[in-house]
Structure formats: structure tokens, C-alpha cells
Image (spheres, grey):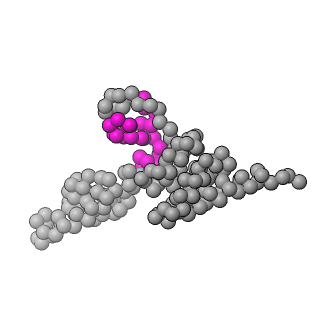
Amino acid sequence: MFLGFTGILPFLGMIPAWIAERKGRNGFGWWLYGTTLFVVALPHALMLQDEEDDCESSSVYRPCPFCAETIHADATVCRFCKRDVPRGERLDETASVAFLIRNLGARDDDTREKAIILLGDRGAPAQAAIPALRAMLEDPARRIRIRAEWAVERIGEKNLRLAEPSP
């Protein structure tokens, strides 16, 4: 009876709990689940998707500028602090160049990378972003440096094509 609830099972239950907690789930609930059904809980925890990534990648939510709680991107009133909030821009193809340049300074690498890609796709209209993109060539994150170099080349290529006389 060494594998019982007072033996090794509580320790085994910590494995799926740790995995699930790193993916944004409730660690205690997953510990109970892992302790009682370890064989099922471990693969289940491994297949979970990150909870934060779901929220950020969909561009459906944004932080409230007053209380910093997560609200819907189209909300005009914060459901937590009940204050009127200005309409926010989304980090997508419809975002302005100024908004994308502001997002180059975000703390999150995923947000910065998405802003770089959107600026690179804009081409010549994103010329104002060239100084900020050049500064990002010294970023500690390798993927940010690579994306910034790509965006600078892409914006520059379009400008060269516009400047060349047609035959």
C-alpha cells in the first residue's frame, strides 16, 4: 500500500500540477487531479495550451488603462472599475504606423515581434519606423533582431523600387 494517498502518489501528482501551473492553470486543482488519476492527468497537462497565449494571440482583449484588468478590446466601459475607456487599437493589419511603433517598445517579445512583422508588411508607409527598427538590431532576443533586420530590408526594398525610374 506504499502507492496510496500517503505514499508516492502525492509526489507524482505534483508533476502534472507543476506543468499545468506553468501554463496558467490552478496548481492545487491539478495536484488533486494528478494524485487521484496520475496516468490520465500527466498527458492531459502536457496537451494543455498556454492560457496567456490564447488571450494575447486573439487580439480580443487589452488592459484597462486605469485599473490594468483585462477587458474586451472593443469595450468603452471597464467592467471592473466602471470608468469610460478610450477605444483601443488592435495589433493587426488595421493598426496605425504610430501605434505599431509604440508597440516596438513593449516588454513582451511576442508583441514586439508582431509589431515588427506588421511594419515590415506595410513597406514604404512604415518609413517612420526605420530608426526604431534599426535600434532593435541590438536587441538581446535573437528572433527580434532577425525580424527587425527583415523589416528594415523590406521597407528599404520597397523604397528602392519606388525610386527607380521605369524603362
On screen, residue 6 versus residue 158, left or right, reads left
Q: Residue at horizontal 62%, vertical 57%?
A: 152
Tell whether 46 sits left or right of 88: left
**How many numbered circles does the render carry?**
0
Q: Is any part of residue 122 visible from this angle?
A: no
Observer-nearest of 137 and 77: 137
x, y (%) of residue 19?
30, 61
Left-right relation of 78 to 118: left
Is the residue 55 above or below the residue 48 in the image?
A: above
Q: Residue furthest bottom?
A: 2
Q: Which residue ends up furthest to the right in the rendered image?
A: 167
If the image is split into quadrants, where does the C terminus sit? bottom right
Image height of 21 relative to 66, above or below: below
Report if residue 109 lies within the magenta region: no
The residue lying toward the viewer, choosing from 51 and 96, is: 96
x, y percent for residue 16: 28, 62
Going by the image, does 147 lie left or right of 155?
Answer: left
Between 146 and 48, the residue placed more toward the observer is 146
Magenta residues? 54-76
Please tell me which residue is depicted at 51% across the width and 63% down the height of the picture. 138
- Relative image position of residue 2 (x, y in whole percent): 12, 72
